Image (cartoon, coloured by chain):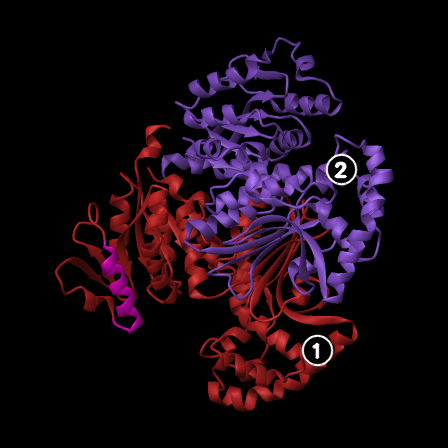
Chain colours: A red, B purple
Amino acid sequence: MTSREQTTKNIPLLLIGCGGVGRQLLQHIVSCRSIHDKQKLHLRVVGICDSKTLLVPLDVFTMELDDAFLLEVCQAKLKGSSLLTLSNSGQHKVFSNPESMGKIIDIAALVPRSTGLAVIDCSASSDTTGVLTRVVELGCCVVMANKKPLSSSMEDYEKLLACPRRIRHESTVGAGLPVIASLNRMLSSGDLVHRIVGSLSGTLGFVMSEVEDGKPFSQVVRSAKNLGYTEPDPRDDLSGMDVARKALILARLLGRRIVLNDIKVESLYPEEMGPSTMSIASFLENGLPLLDKGIQERVEKASSNGNVLRYVCLIDDLRCEVGIQELPKNTPLGRLRGSDNVLEISSRCYNQQPLVIQGAGAGNDTTAAGVLADVFDVQDLFH
Amino acid sequence: MTSREQTTKNIPLLLIGCGGVGRQLLQHIVSCRSIHDKQKLHLRVVGICDSKTLLVPLDVFTMELDDAFLLEVCQAKLKGSSLLTLSNSGQHKVFSNPESMGKIIDIAALVPRSTGLAVIDCSASSDTTGVLTRVVELGCCVVMANKKPLSSSMEDYEKLLACPRRIRHESTVGAGLPVIASLNRMLSSGDLVHRIVGSLSGTLGFVMSEVEDGKPFSQVVRSAKNLGYTEPDPRDDLSGMDVARKALILARLLGRRIVLNDIKVESLYPEEMGPSTMSIASFLENGLPLLDKGIQERVEKASSNGNVLRYVCLIDDLRCEVGIQELPKNTPLGRLRGSDNVLEISSRCYNQQPLVIQGAGAGNDTTAAGVLADVFDVQDLFH
């Protein structure tokens, strides 16, 4: 064994975003200490940033935010407190907006020369794109659960991805499901991908399998909302824009130089029921029931062909689109029930039958686990 | 961008084993040149070794076996020629057994100090374990499609895996299917795996789904042999030992300290029909038909319970076994048809429904693609 393996590798981490995924990530980091110790890996958290405040140890180069403090952050953020309230002890330095993003770049500019830095984006903001791009230029690694920086303009995307080995984003598609890792393995070994079809929204997966059973669309959407499966405004799911962002990320991975606007997206509600003209309550009560008949007719038509309807993303040589497709019952997508995600990938190696990856594609636990696996995976870039 | 990204990374490769997978790997390396160029990666083949001969360029530190020669090797080996016949041009150095393995260690001892070396084992030999262990100690990376070095004693296994980041072996289980990569992601992020059930033999998958349709076992095994699905002696598949090796690799990945003998293996033929007492012809003609009734009864019993039979590996907290299991029809494993592999992984994150990975789990193309993806993945360990 060479000396390189005998010492513990130290990876400084800076977390942007303290919502459900960010908090869960901090908890995972703490609970994985013994696993990572065995692997001679230490994740040293040197900064946490919410939408207002960046909090760092007194000396970011030698100190870290300890585990007790990380768990305290989780508790406080869960209760809705700001990071500012945690900074009274004199044990940390605090930077408030608009200073905080500039400070992250300062840290990135100084830290990596010795040890490297991993910046983790668990926010849902499009404002982080500039910071992430800059820290990559400075030699840092970036791990994202945030889809926004990957769905901006082609120019921004190519700048951000200039050093692809230092960028990981498994949890942007299908939460922790090994979708991006598997696609990257295929692409790096020259396996030509012909077609991707996937159900990448647990919410819409649930809705489509429930209407298949004959339940009215309006009733199914309302139950989904009551079960906590939808966003506060269910139209954020029904618009298909979240799936479209995932489709864009997959298409760009395959080398397509397209933007969000190039994707044909089918919304499950008409424009006149949009948020600018109808309140959430009015949409649920008055809007939704008007859509029942149309959906029911499509379900019945598909069924008479022996098929089912699924809300999918479909990427092949000609198309990159998101919407309802009529699919054979007897396929992994056709058999899908409930809120699991499924991806079918057809390629040179997987030509007679597709490669299928299926499982829970949502939830803070699995999303944060995907982020942590990405961090583990970039460790060889740190010295 | 730092200067590190501007120069092409050079990975010296030494291939052990020139059978179907090894030859396909050489072809993939050549056909992926433009993909790897774009990623600033150059795979420099500095040695090829078959069971008798090691062939290297005149100067292993500065030269490489060029693409035309690699393709020539593929052609020659396909025709059954030895590497020796290719070494007449005076362009290469040749080392014959028993010298060749020692020479690999010599190269490994000298090369990695500057650039690192990846040793690829595409053989099916258990004799490579010592060499692989030694080159890892010397700082090299090892990528295996060969299961044997991972299914030896615990002591050998732990020595070989002493530096886990430098060992990859995706193609030892399910060919190129992203099984090991996905499991490693789960383990490194602290997702506790409760249970793995998988159909990991395309041959036995085919056999079990055909007998489910009412065809006699003997007839199905004979067709599988005629279709080229089985080993020359089908008992090599029917014994379950190949699946047992895969189960051992998965169980050890989960931290089990067990050996091949600890795995309960169900053979699909009785001991008295073994290769030491019955010829292949006699087994096919006289032995196999005696097994039809037993299998048919089990199929019918399962069917009367609404279930199907699958030949699976099953690993949970209590068991690590390989054999026929009665499984519900309405699961990914129960629905499996033909020769695809399926793996269901249940864990903390995938608790209500398992994570499912499904697709072609055999074939030189996908197996070699899995090896190449592993090589691509260790690139960050090279300078």
Please tell me which residue lies in front, B99 or B374: B99
Residue B210 visible in image: no
Front residue of this view, candidates B187 and A138 = B187
Q: Is residue B67 left or right of residue B294?
A: left
How many marks do you count on the picture?
2
Closest to the observer: B172 or B289? B289
Q: Which residues are magenta?
A: A65-81
Both labels 1 and 2 in a single chain? no
- For this orientation, the residue located farthest to the right is B285
C-alpha span from label 1 to label 2 = 57 Å
Type of amino acid at the residue the image marks with label 2: Glu
Q: Tell whether position B158 is magenta.
A: no
The chain letter under disc 1 is A
> Residue at (50%, 43%) from the top-left corner?
B252
Q: Which residue is mark 2?
A: B272
Q: Is residue A71 magenta?
A: yes
**Image position of B54 with respect to B263: above or below:** above
Against B37, is A364 above or below?
below
Q: Determine which of the numbered discs, if any, sits on residue A299 in the image.
A: 1
Specify the quadrant that holds the C terminus of chain A.
Answer: top left
User: Compared with residue B168, is residue B292 higher up or lower down, i.e. above or below?
Assistant: below
Residue for point 78% across, 61% down? B300
Q: Chain of mark 2?
A: B
Which quarter shows the N terminus of chain A?
top left
Most prominent secondary structure in the magenta stretch? helix
Q: Quick one: SS at disc 2?
A: helix
